[in-house]
Amino acid sequence: MVGGFPAGAQTAVNEGIEMQRAVPRAGAPESFADLTAQLQPAVVNISTRQRIEVSRGNSIADLFGLRRPGQGQNTPQTREAQSLGSGFIISADGFVVTNNHVVSPNGRGTVEEITVTMPDGKEYDAELVGADAASDLAVLKINRSEAFPFVKFGDSDQARVGDWVIAIGNPFGLGGTVTSGIVSAVSRNTGSGAYDRYIQTDASINRGNSGGPMFDMQGNVIGINNAIFSPSGGSVGIGFAIPAEVAKPIVAQLREGQDIERGFLGVSIQPVDEDLADSLGLEKNVGEFVQAVSPDAAADKAGIRAGDIVVEVNNKKVTSEQTLSFLVANIAPGTEIPIALYREGKRRTVTATIGKRPSEEEMRQQQMFADPEDEETVPDSADSGQLEETLGLQVVPLTPAINRQLGSPADTSGLAIARVDPNSDAARKGLRRRDVILSANYKSVDSIASLEAIVDEAKTANRDAVLLRVQRRGQPARYIAIRLR
């Protein structure tokens, strides 16, 4: 037998299915021990220490109104938090690859210390060279006089469903742990973002494996273990790894200290599901439906409209495995490309000059105001914790994109209100989401820090309120005094 077929046979027929003879590939060895011994020295444990601010709300005094006048409410406390994960060394001089969420586990925290622990127990202080939240990748640097053991990236595009792989990492903080399995799927889309195209495996991956390598049988890194699907919180045989072909160019840029620039079209999209395909007479699982187009974005300038179905980007088909977001994100800003689409049942092609994707924070801030009726679009990461405590407001600085969504002039400067605490004086005075704060105590505010400074000045002067100048769409600006709490 060769590769499961009789020797010398070119094809075999089994119950009416013709099976073409495949090129033999390396199967599972009798033991993974030799391969593990070669690779494990380059796989490291990563731990971080960070400080985060938490509120002291919901005490008995708060709940029953027993707090004495002048006694602080919801006084922020600083607490220490830790995270554990995995990583691997990619060069003799000590560059380490891991997941961004391993070294930046809390958006409001400040990471004070990153420690890399080698398999022999030696510890090294690590410097964060670069991190990218969109792809969930980060690069660290450790130093010593002698060379570090390291591993190399392989070609994940050659990975096939059924290939054997091994994963090495630090599950639950237990230390170096090796698991094996097969590639369960490639180009797996889980709906989590622009770089959502994973290798799926049944090799056991658990909390703490994040950032660790997935190896092929030649000892090459073909994936970076990133996430699991699990109703229980533990491994149920569905793990995901970032493909090496996605990671390699991003890691190379991070290693050089470069910012990651991605393509951006400026559309709100949804997959073409079975019902939508039937209603339009289109092939299923091909294309994405354009729900909305951002003004002045690349799609708008190219003539793409809401209601179009984009089926090809730069001559590559848009499918559930190869999404519009993935294709565009991997095109350099400024590149001119053809985009094929259907409009009113007719296929046409437009030419778009790809724009630069805004940062994740800018994207979140823009989403805050995308729907004036949807209060739940406000993320938890808006960095205005002090103002939430003192004014009952969550705010973000105005940007041209937010100004467009609010209907404000492009040159408007100030802070957009993202959320109002319903129990605050600001709520009682009628402030609401999408209002714009232009000034405080007659001083202009163009950043969260500037408003915080004015509030601090008022407290120092023993004032109980600040005077805000507030703009609401379609109405003249007005002054409103908001009591501090």
Image (spheres, rainbow, N blue to C red):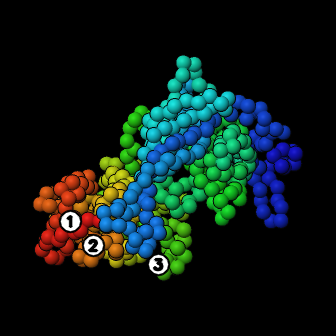
Residue at 43% from the left image edge and 64% from the top image edge: 57
| Residue with the mark numbered 3 | 280
- Circle 3 packing at 10 Å, graded few (<14), some (14-19), many (20+), is some
Residue at 84% from the left image edge and 39% from the top image edge: 30
On screen, residue 397 above or below 369: above
| Residue with the mark numbered 1 | 465
Element assignment for label 3: helix
Q: Report the side of 206 relative to 56 (left or right).
A: right
Q: Earlier in the sequence, mark 2 or mark 3?
A: 3
Instruction: Quote the CA–CA distance across marks 2 and 1.
Output: 10 Å
Instruction: Inspect the image, locate mark 3, and give the three-letter code of the amino acid beneath it.
Output: Leu
| Residue with the mark numbered 2 | 425
Instruction: Quote the CA–CA distance across marks 2 and 3.
Output: 51 Å
Q: Nearer the viewer, residue 331 or 74?
A: 74
Instruction: Quote the CA–CA distance across marks 1 and 3.
Output: 58 Å
Mark nearest the camera among 2 and 3 is 2
Residue 411 visible in image: no
- Circle 2 packing at 10 Å, graded few (<14), some (14-19), many (20+), is many
Q: Position of residue 62 (x, y in %)?
A: 42, 69
Residue 373 visible in image: yes
Say whether marks 1 and 3 touch (CB < 8 Å).
no
Q: Quadrant of residue 479?
A: bottom left
On screen, residue 20 above or below 30: below
Say whether marks 2 and 1 touch (CB < 8 Å).
yes
Q: Quadrant of residue 433?
A: bottom left
Element assignment for label 1: strand
